[in-house]
Every structure is written in structure tokens, then in C-alpha cells.
Amino acid sequence: MSRPTERDRDATRARLLDAAAQVLSRKGYSDFGVNAVAREAGCDKVLIYRYFGGLEGLAQALGERLDVWLRLDLPLAPGGYGMVMGGLLGGYLQALRANGLVKRILAWELVDTGPTVRALGAAKSRAVSAWFQRARAQAAPPPADLDAPAINAILLAAAHHLALREDHDGTFAGLDLTQPDTWRRIETAMDLLIARAYPAAAEDRRHD
Amino acid sequence: MSRPTERDRDATRARLLDAAAQVLSRKGYSDFGVNAVAREAGCDKVLIYRYFGGLEGLAQALGERLDVWLRLDLPLAPGGYGMVMGGLLGGYLQALRANGLVKRILAWELVDTGPTVRALGAAKSRAVSAWFQRARAQAAPPPADLDAPAINAILLAAAHHLALREDHDGTFAGLDLTQPDTWRRIETAMDLLIARAYPAAAEDRRHD
DNA sequence: TACTGAAGTCACCGGTTAGTGACTTCAGGC
DNA sequence: GCCTGAAGTCACTAACCGGTGACTTCAGTA
């Protein structure tokens, strides 16, 4: 009846990639397999082997498309190091929360070390670090007396973990992550932590 | 040859619980099943159904033993709210890093919502929150002008995420989590964040 | 028009899983 | 000493997985 098969190799490849993203972001990594992806794409699983060399190759191709989905073209807020970092982290948190696929990959990385998730994680890590690199190049240098990498890693880890907990059971440490107001509180608290860790006075002195 | 079966129901129950903890903390949650646990315990899987009603009941019983493993009898550091929170968080981070089982469960919670992990997570959450409640009761109240729950949740989330990344690929945001020195830097940065978020001056004023 | 090769389908294989029924083995009460 | 019931073992089913070989169907081309 329906004619999903037009014998178009590129179209089928694209359908498989879309299906892989769908399965991964909706069902999670444990359901991410050749059977489920092929079922979602409406074609036979053998095509995954023919076109991608297997599930690992499909994940690799999916990772190479990640930079498209993780497009983080946030305008950089002007100001000192603390202001820039605050804007960066807030934007990243919002982008992450809205990106179910990236969240699934982040969670997957925490429970598996297989080649499939490695291919995905490497591609994602490349895209994100390039973005941070580019953003940092436009910002003022951090105060020399602080361990900025450690501080930023802590805040980034918090953003990751809270975003991951959000679409799991929606609670963390007594906070209700399903309420928008909770996220406003979190962003305010993050801004406060950053503002007090990177006081503006230390930065102003650099502007002399 | 070996006589592991002494027809002792309680001993077999305990063996199954130990085996469940072993499998979960060593192999991870994806290998956590009736077959693997029974194999580890050296008995038949049917006993899991007979004694625990299935894998879910076994996980429930395991969760009820979690308070034993998560024994956090850290002495509370004296001082203001910030000092107490800093000591609390540092101790929690160290205890968490040393506890592979709890880390596995935390990661499991991020990728699965099935009844088995829910039973575990609920029991763990109960134990941890009771401990935090008890610790907070002995500390000074937080500064009223700050959103202490949000700030603490951020730092706790960071501790969770960094601990989980440690025994995965050992890197996060450019930090090498396999180096003890990196963890010293992280603890120092956490202390700095807490100290500046909860300045001692605001607390001293409460002591009048 | 006939052929060739690629696109796509189907059926199977071996392996693993959860779960169940039937069986044997033993210990304690009478 | 026997008998009942529980502890433990074994074998099996049904369903799923990843992976593969054989097949059909179609499009472009000579």
C-alpha cells in the first residue's frame, strides 16, 4: 500500500539517521539497536549494515550531525570574566535542557563505555569544546588568583546533572525541577555563585 | 564437590543480596538481571522469585540495606553555615567517590525509569535526605537573603556529576579526574564557592 | 528488449533474557 | 522409620537481540 521505498539510497540513509535520533532521544540508549532503529525508519535492519557498517557507524554519522543540533549561537554578554561566564553558562544550560538528544548522550556516557557511545561522545565533545573555546577567546582573561577551570567545571557539572535529572524524575535535593520557577531560582543561584567567585572589582582592575 | 547449599534460607537470601550488590557495582546496571545475580550467588535464579518475588523485590531489599553502606558518620565541622556546608559537601563527595555501588545507582537513575531502579532510588533518597536533615539540624541557619536550597543543590549536583564522570572516562571539561591533585583543586574550588556565597560576616552578625 | 547491479525484503541462526513447571534432596515432626 | 514440606536443581518455553545469506524487485543502460 504505502510506498516508503523509493529505492533512493541517500533518502534511506537520512531516514535511518532521523530514526536513530528519534529512538535515542525518545526511548533512551537501552532501546537503541538495529532492530528498533530499522523499525522506526520503516525499513530493514540490513540496510544499517550496508549503509553504515553497523550500529557503530550509524552512531558515528549521527555524531557528525550533532554540531548542527547543538548550534549555540548565543550572543556573548559584554562585561568582565564573571559576566561572560555567567551568560555562557546560562545559555548553555537552556540549550542543554531543550536538547533531549544531547541529554540522552550525556546520560549514556555515564553508564557505558562501548565503541558506539564513544563515537557519539567524541563528536559531541568536539562540538561543545569548540564552542566554549570560541566564546572564551572573546572574553576577558580570568582572575589570575583563581582556579577558573576548576570553578567552571563545577558549575558545568552542576548544569549537566540538573538537566539530566529534570527529564528523569524531576526532583533533586528537594527541588522540583518540573517547575519553571525552580529553574529561575537555579539560574539566579548560579549567577550569584559566579558573581561572588569572580568579583567585578578584580576584573575592573584589569581594565586600567 | 563444593557444598554451598546448606538449605539455609536466610543465608541464601543474604548471598543473593551480596551478589546483587556485586553485580551492580562491578558490571553495571545493564548486567543486573536474575541470571547474572543467581550466577554470582552460585544458586538458581528461581530462588530470587521465591525469596524476593523477583528482581524488583531484590532491588527493594538492596535499597533498604543502602543506609548501611552509605554510613556517613562524619563529624560536623563547627562554624557558621558556610563552614558547616563546606565540610558536609566535602565529606559527602569523598564518601560518594569511594562508594561504587551508590554511584552505579545514581547513574542508573539517569538512564532508566523502570520499577527496579525506582525501588532502589527511593530507598537511597530516603536514607540520604534523612542524613542531610539530621546534619542541617545541628548547623546554624542559612543567611536569610540567600536561596540556600538552590545553591546547595547546584553544588550537590556538581559533586554527583563529577563523581560519576570519574569512573567513566575520567575527564570532564578539560580536567583529568584520574589525578588526585585534580580532586584537591575541585575541593578547593568548592570551598571557595561556598565561602564566597556564604560570607562569614553575614553569619557572625547572627551570633550577636 | 534483455541484462546487470543495486535497493529492499524475508527467513533464518546462535545467543541471551525472564519466567515457570517438574523434579530431586534433605530436615524435622510424629 | 515414615511423611510432609521446604530448599535447591534442572529443563524448558517464549521473546528478544545482533547478524547474515538468499531472495525479490526495480531502474538505468547497452
Image (cartoon, coloured by chain):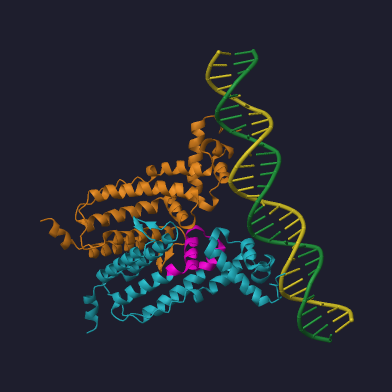
Chain colours: A orange, B cyan, C green, D yellow
B205 to the left or right of A110: left
Quadrant showing the N terminus of chain A: top right
Quadrant showing the C terminus of chain A: bottom left
Query: Can I make out residue A152 in this image?
Result: yes
Residue B76 position in % (x across, y down): 36, 80
Residue name at image x 67 percent, y 65 percent: B45
Residue A101 position in % (x across, y down): 44, 49
> On screen, A66 above or below D28?
below
Residue B190 position in % (x across, y down): 31, 67
Query: Can I make out residue A44 in this image?
Result: no
Write down the quadrant of residue A44 in the picture.
Answer: top right
Residue B11 position in % (x across, y down): 65, 76
- Magenta-colored span: B96-121
The kind of secondary structure the magenta stretch mainly shows is helix
C25 to the left or right of A123: right
Write down the quadrant of residue A171 in the picture.
Answer: bottom left
Residue name at image x 54 percent, y 71 percent: B63
Residue name at image x 70 percent, y 73 percent: B5
Return the residue found at the far left: A208
Nearest the viewer among A117 and C8 is A117
Residue B182 is covered by the magenta coloring: no
Residue B100 is covered by the magenta coloring: yes
Nearest the viewer among B24 and B42 is B42
**Total label count?**
0
